[in-house]
Amino acid sequence: MSVATGERVIEFRDALREAMSEEMRNDTRVFLLGEEVAQYDGAYKVSKGMLDEFGERRVIDTPISESGFSGMAIGAAMRGLRPIVEFMSWSFSLVAADPILNNAAKMLYMSGGQFGCPIVFRGNDGAGGQLASTHSWSVESLYANVPGIKMAIPYDAYDAKGLLKTAIQDDNPVFFLESERLLSTTAHVPEEAYTIPFGKALTRRVGTDCTIISFGRPLHFCLEAAEELAKEGIDCEVIDGRTIRPLDIDSMVTSVKKTSACVVVDQSWSFASVGSEIASQIHAFCFDDLDNHVYRVHSDDVPTPYAYNLEQAYLPNSRKICEAVRQATYNA
């Protein structure tokens, strides 16, 4: 509990566990599977205690075969169950790209509506923990290109619980991208049940001079940059997209029409990215409202470095965001 407010404050990882446990209590078709989710309580302790409550038929340790257990879960979803698949890292999902993209995403369409695929794929996405290039993928831009999926990226513990409950209840495949670097962060999470609808962005900070748009962990850097820029007299509005598919472009456009400047922050590489798609749509809908073109901040266009100092320089950060905002508002 927060002494000052009386509000319950819990960690991001605990919010994820609560969301899964509540949905598993409410619906016996829901089950969790993945590497080390049962006996070991999860690689990051997200599923701690769930084996004791739900048993080995609903919390299942799998072999180290992402393609295999993803395919098995997709088959279970086609037969009416509602699996939650945990990837220890979304980097490992690349091994399962065929079943999750060719089967889960396309099954409803290819079967003429005969087989749905209500399944959630979740796990850690993005760099920030010195895990080197092959374990630091930000997969949102890779996977957002594929029709038939939904994609959510939570910013804090409150959103982690509300968005994950919505994902589990959804009848479509949902890619749920978490950040290892946020798992120990805390936020107010109500004890009563709640969900957060997909496709509804949230204004994290109200401003008048520039709109900053982002998702997930980079939002923390956006808010940090906004506070720094306020000292210079630049008042930024910060928009949390919450979901990439569906994308709430309407809320983003409304903000940009007010501020006449925009910076998009995306932890993916810049080429063919979510950031470039958002910038393209903002240019299309706000052409006459913008005082400058949309600026973008991405991870540098190199494989993720291992060295801590290089990794931090490679990622989006408040310094890069501040510089982009200054350029976007230079002629305003």
Image (spheres, rainbow, N blue to C red):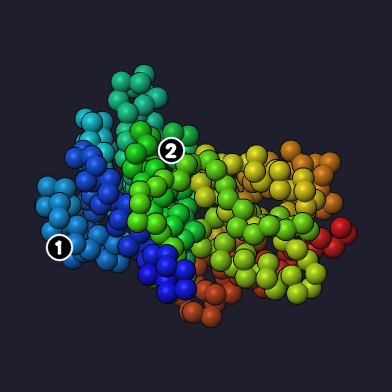
As drawn, 115 above or below 76? above
Q: Quadrant of the N terminus?
A: bottom left
**Residue 301 at least partly seen:** no
Q: Earlier in the sequence, mark 1 or mark 2?
A: 1
Give the residue displayed 22% in from the left and 63% down from the top. 48
Give the residue displayed 56% in from the left and 63% down from the top. 218
Q: Quadrant of residue 10?
A: bottom left
**Residue 241 at least partly seen:** yes
Please, which residue is most extreme toward the right here? 331
Q: Amino acid at mark 2?
A: Ile
**Residue 149 badge:** 2
Q: Quadrant of the C terminus?
A: bottom right
Distance Cα–Cα, label 1 vs label 2: 30 Å
**Residue 39 badge:** 1
Residue 52 is left or right of residue 329, and the answer is: left
Query: Callout 2 environment at 10 Å: few (<14), some (14 to 19), or many (20+)?
Result: many
Give the residue displayed 68% in from the left and 41% down from the top. 281
Residues at badges 1 and 2 in contact (C-beta under 8 Å)? Answer: no
Give SS at disc 2: loop
As drawn, 319 above or below 72? below
Query: Callout 1 environment at 10 Å: few (<14), some (14 to 19), or many (20+)?
Result: some
Residue sitting nearer the eye, 217 or 128: 217
Give SS at disc 1: loop
Residue 36 is left or right of residue 227, and the answer is: left
Q: Position of residue 291 (x, y in %)?
A: 84, 51
Q: Position of residue 23 (x, y in %)?
A: 28, 45
Q: Position of residue 19 (x, y in %)?
A: 32, 52
Residue sitting nearer the eye, 7 or 263: 7
Q: Position of residue 222 (x, y in %)?
A: 62, 64
